Image (spheres, rainbow, N blue to C red):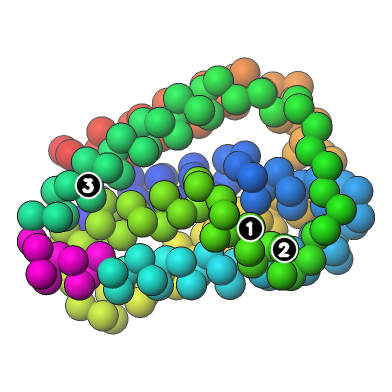
Amino acid sequence: MDITSFLMYCFIVTFTPGPTNIVILSTAHNYGAKKAMEYTYGSTIAFGLLLSISAILNTVLITILPKVLLFMQLIGTMYMLYLAYQIYRMDASEPTNNSTGTFVSGFLMQFLNPKVVLFTLTVIPSFILPYYTDMVTLTISVVVITIIGFLAFVTWVSFGELFKKFLQSHKRVVNIMMALCLVCATVMIWL
């Protein structure tokens, strides 16, 4: 397993702006870190739950249909390239409004967030299952990815307005760099 591309992919997808991160940023900016952390806890628990479900489902699928792994890797690759394109053309200057930064809304957001759902469905079969299928390794992987997600969420809380200003003032350069890193991680899966 290429740990570098795995970690790069996890960090890029979880730290780049997406629906959850933007809501966290907006909540921290508008209602403070305490309210944003409440939302973050709900988001993190749902993120870990989705990763666990994905690991179980993908392990069962691979046991029943071994060729499904290649198919899931192809879907993961296409999704990663799509994300790179979306990051490249993203406009971080659009304002986001959030008045419900609660634990429940953070939890439910993860199940409705296509970025999270697709990430959780593709990261395990793209990076872990080609090399490991034992429950201990899958559990450790889910925990590591969940921690990375939590760190991403906390980063968005911590930097609130400061991070938002940085993205807005350097959004083009940041988006291009993140998109290129994601393309690099995608290519490394197949090498």
Question: Residue 73 — which label?
Answer: 3
Q: Is residue 112 magenta?
A: no
- Residue corresponding to mark 1: 109
- Residue corresponding to mark 2: 105
Q: Is residue 62 magenta?
A: yes
Question: Residue 83 — which label?
Answer: none
Relative side of 65 to 42, left or right: left
Q: Is residue 24 visible?
A: yes
Front tag of 3 and 1: 1
SS assignment for the magenta stretch, majority: helix
Split into 4 quadrants, where in the image is the C terminus? top left
Q: CA distance from mark 3 to mark 1?
A: 25 Å
Q: What residue span does the magenta drawing correspond to?
A: 58-66
Q: CA distance from mark 2 to mark 3?
A: 31 Å
Residues marked 2 and 3 touching at CB (< 8 Å): no
Query: Which quadrant of the figure has residue 143?
Result: bottom left
Residue type at mark 2 is Ser
Classify mark 1: helix, strand or loop: helix
Q: Residue at x 16, y 55 (%)?
A: 69
Estimate the x, y position of residue 96 in percent, counting from the top left: 79, 38
Residues marked 3 and 1 touching at CB (< 8 Å): no
Residue type at mark 3 is Gln
